[in-house]
Image (cartoon, coloured by chain):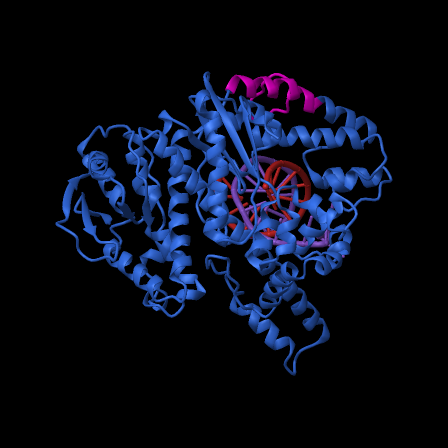
Chain colours: A blue, B red, C purple
Amino acid sequence: MHIVLDRVDGSVLATPLTDAGEPDGEPTLVAEPGLPAFVAATERPGVRWVWADTTRWYPAVLAADGRVARCVDLRLGHRLLRTALATRTSALATAPESAWDTAPVVVLEARPAPATQASLFDDALLAQEPVADGLDPVAELRAQLAAVAGAADPGALRLLLAAESAGALVAAEVKHAGLPWRVDVHERLLADALGPRVPYGVRPQRLEELAADLRTVLDDPALNPDSPADVLRSLRRAGLVVDSTRKWELERLEHPAIAPLLEYKRLYRLLTANGWTWLDEWVHDGRFHPEYVVGGVVTGRWAANGGGALQLPKQVRSAVVADPGWKLVVADAAQLEPRVLAAMAGDTAMAAAGDGQDLYDGVVASGAVQTRQQAKMAMLGAMYGATQGEGGRFVPRLARAFPRALDLVERAARAGERGEPVTTRLGRTSPVPEAAWFEARNRAYSVEGTPAMQRAVESRARSWGRFTRNFVVQGTAAEWALSWMGGLRTRLAARTPGPVTSGPHPVFFVHDELVVHAPAADADWVAEQFRAAAVDAGRILFGGFPVTFPLSVAVVDAYSEAK
DNA sequence: ACTGTGTGCGCG
DNA sequence: AAAGCGCGCACACAGT
């Protein structure tokens, strides 16, 4: 059954509905502070909590040591169904824009108890504002159920919506629990690399030394190594032929300035991205609390808000250390995207290349290319649309060995070049180019068109084609990852039903990798659950198609020890 | 003092 | 404009 939560006149209205969205008992009015207790008392197998935004409803439940097994995140569902090809003609998709499309998701942080009546009043207003915006979650749920039921393949969309909502629960729980972070380890790492801590704005000792080296070697006493333009000028003055100060370009040069410059850039990056300021801002009480944005990327991948959770450098992962008596179980899906591509395309040859082994090794064994590196380059080139270089060169060989897989990405690219949408396995649909894109194309091929205009338009078309080519693979891989982590979450909860942090729980996620913080005694069991959930995810998306999703799983004390 | 853009690099 | 996708972030610099 569904239990729909809404805020009405400062209280919470809980409306029970059947799975089909019909009334199923009397609604209950709950005072806001009583919500976690109500959820705890009502939660049971079969219940799906329906709310506008997981980010707005779930944190209070978690803060009270509660949790739910399943939810329906209406805003995430709304966005999927408004844009999905499969529900394009539904009432939901054809209705004018509403607050469901535009209302901002406001995440309220825990606040200290209000001191005055006035601030109590303000807080109450704030807390209500985002959902009091004419949103009717009961009507929205019914509209979504109807849209799904009217689609040609409702099963796929139901899976997609369930996976997205499960992801929202995981994201909220990860933020709540936090990634164990040893500030002392991080500070030691910073001191070793940069020198003693300095105030913001002051260049640390090691960077100062490297800056002095650079000024000497380049004979440029005023050089500011933080300014790419300044560095570029100085390098050119020293007789080097360079177009930028990018690392890959500098690495090819022979000059005494290059080594200290690359070292400077490496340390400067550490300082600005994950230095003392980052530690102060993002790590509290030994935890980094990453804020994920579920579905924040068009392809369905998660994005992150603040703290750079999805770009956590390998350099600082030694500071991610399990609590005493606990372990980190780090699981990574090996060559996820090519496997997903093989399965989507029904390419049994490519699936066989990855069966029980490194997929790139399997591609080499198939005879398509000579080395693992070539296989990897070619595969990435095929999925990204490379036409030149190492990647582009070997794509044709791949196309001969695995015609079905390559045909799938080619067709996605052609559709994108025409400005058509493409869809993932479960039906997430790509955006189409904006009107100006089509107008430019029409103009270029009208009487006023010129060869230059046509070249520009073709270039933009190929660019959009590379996006749609990648969309189908990246987006379906994201669906696999959502299914995987959702399944894992359910398995973990079945073992330890109490508060999230009382047993094994996810603490970090990066596209195809998931980290669980687990009591040491449970670590091996968690590793098994990871593998079982990966098998489930493969079946959910691809049924009986013979594709495998091997994981590398490591049980470690520090994140840096994995892989 | 603020805002927008470009550069560069981290991650998958 | 790195052959080739998707992001976030911090900074320099230019414009207002």
Q: Which sits in the foreground, A503 or A381?
A: A503
Task: Examine the rendered structure and indicate whether residue A187 appears above or below residue A134.
Answer: above
Locate residue A256: give its quadrant: top right
Residue A310 image offset from top left, x and y in percent: 53, 38
Q: Is residue A216 left or right of residue A284?
A: right
Q: Which sits in the foreground, A250 or A71?
A: A71
Q: Which residues are magenta?
A: A183-208
Residue A35 image offset from top left, x and y in percent: 21, 37
Give the residue drawn at x 69%, y 46%.
A362
Assign the C terminus of chain A to one quadrant of the image. top right
Considering the whole magenta stretch, tell me its main secondary structure: helix
Q: Is residue A370 left or right of residue A455?
A: right
Q: Which sits in the foreground, A116 or A352?
A: A352
Give the residue drawn at x 44%, y 33%.
A506
The reply to whether residue A221 is visible in this rendering is: no
Task: Examine the rendered structure and indicate whether residue A433 appears above or below residue A355.
Answer: below
Residue A404 image offset from top left, x and y in percent: 63, 61
Magenta highlight on residue A435? no
Locate residue A69: give its quadrant: top left
The reply to whether residue A47 is visible in this rendering is: yes
